[in-house]
Image (tube, helix red, strand yellow):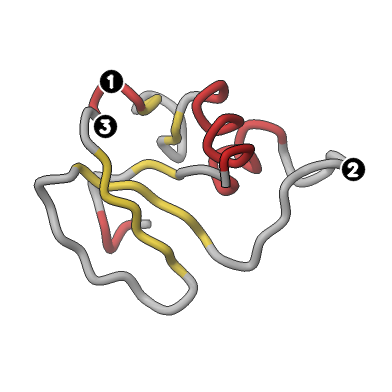
Amino acid sequence: MLCCEPAVLWGPSALRAHEGPGRRDAVDTTEIHVAIDMSRRATAPEGVVVHRRSGLAERGLWGLTPPRQRYEDAVLEVALG
């Protein structure tokens, strides 16, 4: 995620960070999903999926480590697929 900073974990990766890896129903993916502001461009390394989103400043929990998408938004993002 450092390669895309400032960025937040997004979608399934945000859910995994919120719920923890020990949950039986936790979303499991081999890719790491991160979001950056729509105005930016980033080249991600293999295994990282970059999503460009508007209004990211309000949609991320920047005080958490690592920063991540709000839980309720991550649930919707995954459900809408």
Residue 56: mark in rendering:
3
Residue 28: mark in rendering:
none
- Relative image position of residue 25 (x, y in whole percent): 85, 41
- Relative image position of residue 80 (x, y in whole percent): 57, 39
Looking at the rendered image, the quarter that the N terminus falls into is: bottom left
Question: Is residue 42 placed above or below 23 in the rendered structure?
Answer: below
Q: Distance between the residues labelled 3 and 1?
A: 5 Å
| Kind of residue at disc 3 | Leu
Picture quadrant where residue 23 is located: top right
Question: Is residue 76 placed above or below 13 in the rendered structure?
Answer: above
Picture quadrant where residue 19 is located: top right
- Relative image position of residue 37 (x, y in whole percent): 20, 42
* Secondary structure type for disc 2: loop
Q: How far apart are marks 2 and 1 (CA)?
A: 30 Å
Q: How far apart are marks 3 and 2 (CA)?
A: 30 Å
First along the sequence among labels 2 and 1: 2
Q: Residue at label 2? A: 24
Q: How crowded is mark 1: few (under 14 residues within 10 Å), some or many (20 or more)?
A: few
From this viewpoint, which residue is outermost toward the front? 80
Q: Decide: marks 2, 1 in contact (CB < 8 A)?
A: no
First along the sequence among labels 3 and 2: 2
Residue 58: mark in rendering:
1
* Secondary structure type for disc 1: helix
Picture quadrant where residue 9 is located: top left
Q: Decide: marks 3, 1 in contact (CB < 8 A)?
A: yes
* Secondary structure type for disc 3: helix
| Kind of residue at disc 2 | Arg
